[in-house]
Amino acid sequence: MKFRFITATINILMVDEVKQRLREIAVPGLSVSKTKGYGAYKNFFQRDLMTTHARLQIYAPESRVTEIVEAIMDSGGIGSEDDGIVAISPVETIYRITDKKEVNAEEF
């Protein structure tokens, strides 16, 4: 089974709702960080057009990607132009640092 890397850039006000929804569907791990940038939506009230968002990063088995992405999109939007985006990338291999062994999707 293959892995995917899900990166979601969402409105920073929606982080708690998204984290709660991901816990409800038993997503095993999540990283969250603040990020600044601009895309289709630009903050014209700031000199540099930048907007602060949250970046969520999740490694998941390919079989769970649709469920996770739908959970993010369902709980992460407020109906605004700056709701964000979700991207999915392939992952070649994941290793556990603890025992230096390759992780298979069934262990996730």
Image (tube, grey):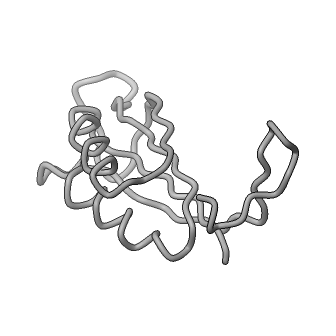
Image coordinates of residue 37 in percent, x first then y, are 44, 36
Instruction: Give the residue displayed 38% in from the left and 31% down from the top.
Output: 50
Instruction: From the viewer's perspective, tell me whether residue 97 is left or right of residue 36.
Output: right
Instruction: Give the residue displayed 47% in from the left and 30% down from the top.
Output: 33
Instruction: From the viewer's perspective, tell me whether residue 30 is left or right of residue 20.
Output: right
Image coordinates of residue 58 in percent, x first then y, are 52, 51
Q: Quadrant of residue 74?
A: bottom left
Q: In which quarter of the image is residue 106?
A: bottom right
Rendered view: 70 above or below 7: below
Instruction: Give the residue displayed 40% in from the left and 46% down from the top.
Output: 9
Instruction: Give the residue displayed 29% in from the left and 36% down from the top.
Output: 15
Rendered view: 17 above or below 103: above
Quadrant for the C terminus, please: bottom right
Instruction: From the viewer's perspective, tell me whether residue 74 is left or right of residue 22.
Output: left
Image coordinates of residue 47 in percent, x first then y, are 34, 22
Instruction: From the viewer's perspective, tell me whether residue 58 is left or right of residue 80.
Output: right
